Amino acid sequence: MKHLLSIEELTAAQLTALLDHAAVLKANRGTRNPQPLAGQTWALIFTKSSTRTRVSFEVGIRELGGFPMFLSKNDIQLGRGEPIRDTARVLGRMVHGCIIRTFAQQDVIDFAEFSNIPTINALTDDEHPCQILADLLTIREKLGTWENRKIAFIGDGFSNMTRSWMWAAKHLGFELVVASPIACQPPADFLTNLNAHNVSITTDPAAASKGAHVINTDVWLSMGQEGQAEKEAEFAGFEVNSTLLAHSAPGHIVLHCLPAYRGKEISAEVLELHADTIFQQAENRLHAQKAILCALAR
Ligand code: CP
Ligand code: NVA
């Protein structure tokens, strides 16, 4: 594996190997500390806000012996229009790897190509692969496995989160039901390309959550969509609340990648009731990303 740009391009074997290593790194944290990034500098180029991703990567890089260099778009000439490929060609000669959070997936692909250093997608409009690895690790910790489990995603059916989740379902074979308003459902060409019989789409959140072992949600308006009141209005009835969860499987868990907007995609009551899982999920960003860094370190 040279880069981590999407869940789409990973295999089931790569996904499970990363999760297995993440679990080892988590168990050994503070006692055995591998240093595969010793002497290395890894850049973080972020053109969108972040709490979890930035902190977990900065801490993870340090724990693996490396030095993180955070560069917001306002710190570098990228923010004044310098092309991503030129930024990549410069950084590729100076740093050992790069983590990018931005809008266009193509920018991450171009950075990987032109820098020729390990490149990690830390969220684009298309995918959020690091988050999905942390989510899968959390499911394994809480439920033992995703096999024979029904996973529901309630919310925007074509966000970076749902797209990555649909690819994870394709690779790993679990049942995924996405409940989303018609206007926010994945387009037919995406579903044709996905070609996953275990992924279904509905407009009915109650049907999706019925019998589900995992109920997953995310903001209705992703970064870059702020103020789209018309889109937000589509989600009436899509709040993950105790009524919706009443018919979920016994022992179900609730996931939220955070940040959460209580009273919109999730009720305050459900968030607090499932806070143990949701903040374990947030912590697992650190362990999952350390596994990614180890897999990509040269
Ligand atoms: N879930 C997640 O990516 O959080 P941040 O936006 O805070 O990094
Ligand atoms: N779909 C959300 C995820 C945030 C971590 C967004 O892109 O804003």
Image: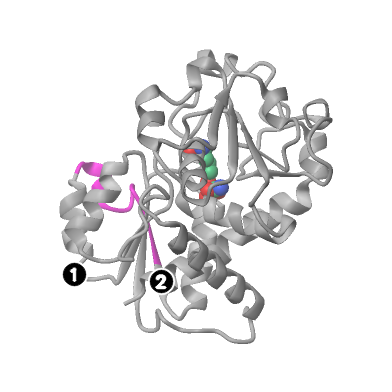
- Residue 104: which quarter of the image? top left
Is residue 287 one of those drawn in magenta?
Answer: no
Q: Nearer the viewer, residue 274 or 259?
A: 274
Q: Which residues are magenta?
A: 69-81
For numbered disc 1, what is the local secondary structure? loop
Left or right: 59, with 195 as reference point: right
The reply to whether callout 2 and callout 1 are in contact (CB within 8 Å) is: no
Q: Position of residue 268 (x, y in %)?
A: 78, 34
Q: Which mark is residue 139?
A: none
Residue shown at 50% from the left, 69% from the top: 290
Left or right: 147, with 68 as reference point: right
Q: Which residue is mark 2?
A: 295
Asked if the beta carbon under badge 1 is closer than 8 A to the nearest atom of ligand 1, the reply is no
Amino acid beneath label 2:
Ala
60 w.r.t. 248: above or below: below
Q: Position of residue 231 (x, y in %)?
A: 51, 17
- Residue 258: which quarter of the image? top right
Q: Position of residue 248 (x, y in %)?
A: 78, 35
For the residues labelled 2 and 1, the Cα–Cα distance comes to: 21 Å
179 w.r.t. 294: above or below: above
For numbered disc 2, what is the local secondary structure? helix
Q: Which residue is mark 1?
A: 93
